[in-house]
Image (tube, helix red, strand yellow):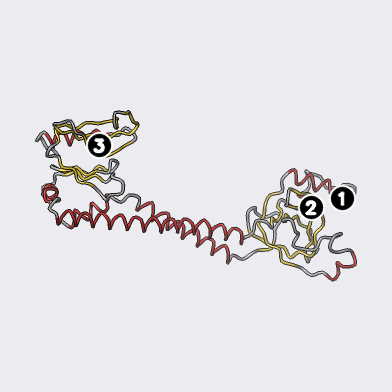
Amino acid sequence: MEQLKKELSQFGCKGLGTTIVMFIVGLLIIAVGVVLGKQDFEAFDPVGKAYEFQQIDAVYAMGPFAENGNEKYYIVEDTEGMWYLMKTGEKCPVPVYGEDVLDDDLSALTGQVVKGKTASIYYNMAQALADFFQGSGVDLTAYNYEDYFGKYYLDTTDTVTNSSIVCYCLGGCLAFVGAILALAYAGRRNKIRKQADLLEQQGVLGRIYADYAAGQYQWYHKLRIVVFGHDIIDFAVGKEAFKVHSLDAVTNVFKCNMVDGEPTVTSYIALETADGTRRLIAPFTSNSHELADAVEQIKRNILGGTRW
């Protein structure tokens, strides 16, 4: 029966939905990176909004008035003579007054576009700025700095390029993992289908087909087993695609927490024959009504009281 083979292939392969979602999310994150890479930068607005990508047409920088490791904070003058605050990495992207240029050089300087993301000026930064201006005649304090520099500074270490790269890396990883899982899913599904074809040729699936046609079967998704009237198909079998367990010789079935005489946190369904031989199937690590339901259904099957 092709329909049953199809359902068995789907049942034995878990996580297709998660795989698809992971792959799609990865592609969406990559798309976000592309959009960010093409984003237009507006002129820096120190009283606008935080966390927006903007730019300053900077001429030179003064400072640094504060440092934090390799990060430095400067006052930067733009082509219109406006002063703004800017955070950079170890090297400032524009000439620094007193280091790279002096008074005689300022007239020859031209603007350089510096891009970054706006961020809120915090108290320690404002205090360092006030200390920098102390004795200069500028009445700037940690409480009135907004009157001079606004609420935000430009963080040139947080650029749209960096954000795009993060999106590309994260999205690429998710999409790659999703593709690998999809290939694994397809391989597992083909393996199940090939084993079903082989068992069909060997005549093993004859009774299963009859039970399926009669509606005598039950899927137990958490346990990864399918209980038929006369057999059980078990997908929790390691490297094998699945295993068929006949109920012909089974005289008892129960929940078991012992393996080789030792207690275990994993619960199994034990299929026991008249000579005491046991087969453990459907390993499960937590209590579930599905486990109890499966045990009761198998009991009814072996006692001749099948009820679906």
Q: Which residue is mark 1?
A: 138
- The answer to whether marks 2 and 1 mark residues whose Cβ atoms lie closer than 8 Å is yes
Between the residue at mark 2 and the residue at mark 1, the CA separation in whole angstroms equals 10 Å
The quadrant where residue 222 appears = top left
Q: Which residue is mark 2?
A: 148
The secondary element bearing badge 1 is classed as loop
Q: Residue at x 25, y 31 (%)?
A: 255
The residue pinned by badge 3 equals: 280
Image quadrant in which you'd find residue 91:
bottom right
State which quarter of the image contains the C terminus. top left
User: What residue lies at 84% left-to-right and 63% top-to-bottom?
Assistant: 100
Q: CA distance from mark 2 to mark 3?
A: 77 Å
Crowdedness of circle 3 by 10 Å Cα count: few (<14), some, many (20+)? some
Judge whether 250 appears above or below 37 on screen: above
User: Label 1 vs label 3: CA separation?
Assistant: 83 Å
Task: Return the residue nearer the eye: 8 or 114.
Answer: 8
